[in-house]
Image (cartoon, rainbow, N blue to C red):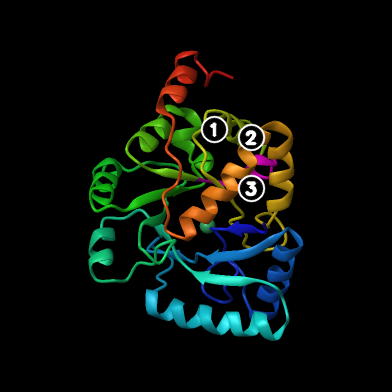
Amino acid sequence: MSLIDLHCHILPGVDDGAADLSTALELAKAAVDQGVGHILLTPHHMDRQYLNHKQELLNKVARFQTCIDEAQIPLTVFCGQEVHINGELIHAIETDDVLFMDEANRYLLLELPHSDIPTYASNLIFELVSRQIIPVIAHPERNVIIQKNPEKLYELVSQGCLTQITAGSYLGIFGQEVERLTGKIIQANLGTVFSSDAHNFQGRRFLMKDAFDKLNQEYPEKTEVFKQNAKDIINGENVGPVNFKQIKEMTKKKFWLF
Ligand SMILES: [Fe+2]
């Protein structure tokens, strides 16, 4: 089974990812080289810098797929957004300006600020979950509050969130501390899927095969689970239940002290 990437910024000219079509096509080839067959394109949305409205993105992604096909790159792309947490989110959902990770509008890729978890986050997540929307927290391992206090991630998962771990985090692209925390998150069963969050060829690149190779060495039992979870999310199917009992046991053992 080829890999499914659920977080990626290679749609050309829409955010801080690929600047133009030729770069985007080179990145698409790099994705295929990393074993990726399907990508959910997730331009930044509502993060105070980028507003990428739903209908515009749908048109751009359709055009990009045509270019991918013309270049004979064996890759299928879907249209999503990386939605920054914000007070207008419910309004944006109600006015149909949010793209989910699946066509059934069940899973939402939700980005937290880099250095904060807003005080309203808990209420907002409750509101989303009460609407049968499951937030998938983008790269929690890169959030400074979670880095200082990983139990915060347990709270988010307890509220009903899933998590998207960035492949490069697990490989040390963001430093040893993030790499170590990422491993702990996976070990604690608080990780749901790997995605690339690919932007370019330098720092934030695909690395999906490399991350799965490492996962297969360290936690072989999770390799198929991560792949299946990605498939279930993009298909709008149920993702396997979170084992809270097992997570609690681990946190009781002061699991996070490292
Ligand atoms: Fe991203």
Foreground: disc 2 or disc 1: 2
* Camera-nearest residue between 46 and 79: 79
Foreground: disc 3 or disc 2: 2
What amino acid is at disc 2? Glu
Q: Answer few, some or many: residues within 10 Å of disc 3's Cα (few below 14, many 20 plus, some between 14 and 19).
A: many
What amino acid is at disc 3? Ala
Determine which of the numbered discs, if any, sits on residue 5 in the image: none
Residue at image position (47%, 46%) is 114
Q: Tell me where the magenta segment starts and ends, as one range.
A: 164-174
Q: Is 116 on the left or on the right of 140, as rendered? A: left
Q: Answer few, some or many: residues within 10 Å of disc 2's Cα (few below 14, many 20 plus, some between 14 and 19).
A: few
| Residue 89: percent from left, percent from top | 28, 59
The residue under label 2 is 221
The residue under label 3 is 167
The residue under label 1 is 185
Q: Is 53 on the left or on the right of 210, as rendered? A: left
